[in-house]
Each structure stands twice: as structure tokens, then as C-alpha cells.
Amino acid sequence: KSQMSSVSADDVGTDTIDDISIARSETMFRIRTITAFVILLPSDFDPRTKITNGNETKTTSGLQTKIEACHAVLQDLRNRFEAEGYDVQTVRISTNPFEEWLLENATDDSSN
């Protein structure tokens, strides 16, 4: 038969609190990866011009914009999880299948 005992706050010394903190950190999840899913379109590879700082122009693409936005979200999530004590091993971006965004233009060109 097991015996149950109650523990009050007065019964817990600082050594025990440190042990509890260590045990908590050892039992926290280790997050293998955080994945963001991005749907790429053939038009995402077309260059676009974006004006920054008035006179300065910078050429970007929809692909670059999507990847940079995903990267920012993933880094924010990683920081939030790590602030809560979780270990995050990697972050990654996953896209729709290669042929959906690469070969669509080739199919369109062959029909002309």
C-alpha cells in the first residue's frame, strides 16, 4: 500500500526548489522542428520593383517576400518557445510540390 503525505510551502527548502527547477527543465519538450507551409506560384518568381527610402529602388520577387515573411514568423515562434523554456532544434519552410510552381509555365508555353 502506498502512503500519501502532504507537503506545505514551509517544508520545501531552496535546495528542493532548485531540484524542482532542474527536473522541470529536464522534462520539458524538446521541439524537433517548427515548420511553416508556403504555397508558391509561378508568378512568385517574376521580378517586382519595390521603392524604399524615396529615391532608392530595390528589385524583389514574390518568392523573396514570402520567404522573408515566413522566416520572421518562424524566428518569432522560436523565440517565444525558447522563452518558455523549450529547446527548439530547427525551423524550416515547406512548399507545395516542385512541379506545381516550376512546370506550370512550361505547360503554358507548350500550348502556344
Image (cartoon, rainbow, N blue to C red):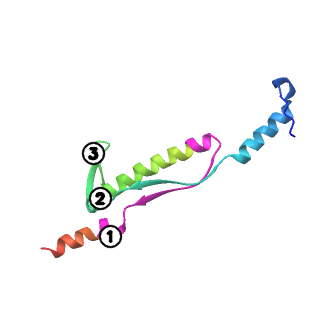
Marks 2 and 3, how far apart at CA = 25 Å
71 relative to 101 in the view: left or right: right
Mark number displayed over residue 55: 3
Of residue 1 and residue 90, the one placed in the foreground of this image is 1
The residue that appears at 78% across and 38% down in the rendered structure is 20
**Outermost residue, front side:** 1
Picture coordinates of residue 112, whole percent (x, y): 12, 73
Q: Nearer the viewer, residue 32 or 50?
A: 32
Identify the residue at the far left of this view: 112
Q: Is residue 71 above or below residue 83?
A: below
Is residue 61 at all visible to an observer of this figure? no
What segment carries the magenta color?
80-102
Q: Disc 1 on helix, strand or loop?
A: helix
Q: Is residue 47 left or right of residue 5?
A: left
The location of residue 54, given as percent across then percent down, is 28, 42
* Neighbourhood count class around disc 1 (C-alpha, 10 Å): few under 14, some 14–19, many 20 upward: few
Instruction: Give the residue at mark 1.
Output: 99
Structural distance between the alpha carbons of marks 1 and 3: 38 Å
Q: Secondary structure at mark 3?
A: loop
Q: Which mark is residue 44?
A: 2
Residue 62 drawn at (x, y percent)? 31, 55
Tell me, yes or no, whether the highlighted magenta stretch contains residue 98: yes
Amino acid type, residue under disc 2 in the picture: Asp
